[in-house]
Amino acid sequence: MKTNEEIMEILAAYDLTGSYRKAAELAGCDHHTVRRYVQLRGTGIDPAVRLPRAKKIDVFMPKIEELIEASNGRIGADQVHKKLTAMGFEGTDRTTRRAVAAAKESFKSGHRRIHRPWVSEPGLWMQWDWGEGPRLGDRRTSLWCAWLAWSRFRVVIPVLDKTIPTIAACLDTTFRAFGGVPTYCLTDNEKTVTTTHIAKIAVRNPDIVPIGRFYGTVIRTCLPADPASKGGVENAVKVAKRDLVPTEVNLRPTYGSFAEIEAACDEFMAEVNGRVHRETRRAPVEMLGEERFRLHQLPEHPYTAAFGLTRQVHPKDATIQVDGVRYSVPHQFAGRQVFIRWHAEELVVTSIVEGVPVEIARHARSTPGNPVILDEHYPDSPRGTRTPTPQTAAEEAFLAIGPGAGAWLEEAAAEGTRGIASKMAEAVALAKLRGTGAVDRALGTAAMAGRFTDGDLRSILDHQLFTDGPVETSRAGENHSLQPGTGGWSGFGHRPGDNH
């Protein structure tokens, strides 16, 4: 193939001489080449463009186009190749793939869907959708992703289910994050929102309608299997999953608790809402301040009818009674009213915290006589052991010596040692003379060795003066007891001479 410069030289030589052979001698090429380029120029074809050559698959192109049209562009190249081979095509599957790709591109160009740009108004539209959230062990979570169309303000909330009560709680939390209620809420056609379609008309779930009516908004759904009609929130879900779900790309570690997922979502919202959006060239949190003036006013109290039955938390043990079974709730809610509902085999407990519905506990179903009490609901309660807490000035002075003093007090009390108060006063006096660190180490050694008699503390202190590091301690075992044996009583009750 000649370059553009060479082709121009050949044509210029022909224009100068008017002869194919003379032009070939001047341009240094064959006269047939000169004739070909001159004829191409005469027909209006660009001489620099290579003309397509005939291919074996050309005769089968009408059939390929017919198959793609019949399948609406969904048929694969492997199936097309099988059909062409049966019709006598002798080419390779690579040739078929190229032909099918070209035919599909031509088909899409004639059937490509064109979207009118959506110019949203302030306060008019909100969109929400669900995304697969991080896993907590074997448990799945979901991400509620809401998007205010005009300001691009996003709200991401992690949840454990996608039931109607959860939707009600997420809607209330989202509206309060917005500072108002938009006119329309657009979402997908899940069963919690749309039960079925009749004549392409969505039949709304009767349980979701009162929620929208309570907040003064209209819940609408997009076309089935048409994510392009709510592309804004689809992109918000994609970004949230990319940043929040641990993957090999973002190198985010796995979450240890649900509270960690909530904290990560809060950090994500603060980041995306505070940075400049590429479309509006403004930060969403800044635009939200303007859009709030176009949002409807929020009800003072959240919608609670979907959260189930009410229960009063016991003021002393922070438990509720459900079907004859006691379930614990966090101790902060003792004496307050909560809402309960069953989700499959789980009891979901919801409460109103600062005007927002929050799930505070979730328990597996139990039976009467088997209460479900979680330790994390009682963080300040004893766990079987007591921690020394000073009640007097003397006790405070003793425990201020160090952790060894607390260990000594616990062990001495467990042994029933007499005169503990006087021994504590002696330790305080020795700490002033010999130093707090030495006495604390001696008390720890005494606690490990079980030495609580008078003079033991001074003895250990004196021994520590001639040793470096901790003192090795040992306790007498059962095999080295000074208690006399009972072998002498083996003949008790038998007369001399009896066989026993």
Image (cartoon, rainbow, N blue to C red):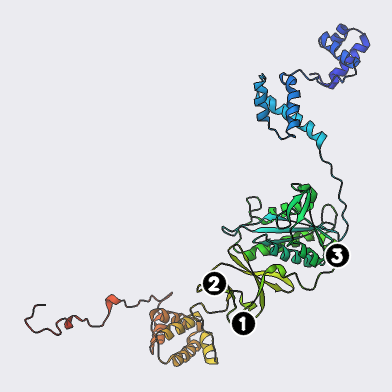
Residue 5's spot in the image, x, y percent? 85, 21
Residue with the mark numbered 3: 295
Please name the residue shown 50% across and 80% down the image: 403
Going by the numbered disc 1, the residue's amino acid type is Pro
Distance (Cα) linking label 3 and label 1 = 40 Å
Residue type at numbered disc 3: Leu
Q: Return the mark for residue 315.
A: 1
The image position of residue 60, as x and y in percent, is 73, 21
Q: State how far apart marks 2 and 1 are (Cα).
A: 17 Å
User: Does any portion of residue 272 appear in the rendered image?
Assistant: yes
Establish if 355 lies above or below 248: below
For the residue labelled by badge 1, is the local secondary structure a helix, a strand or a loop?
loop
Mark 3 residue crowding within 10 angstroms, few (<14) / some (14–19) / many (20+) = some
Name the residue at 27% across, 75% down.
479
- Which of 171/215 is in front? 215
Q: Quadrant of the C terminus?
A: bottom left
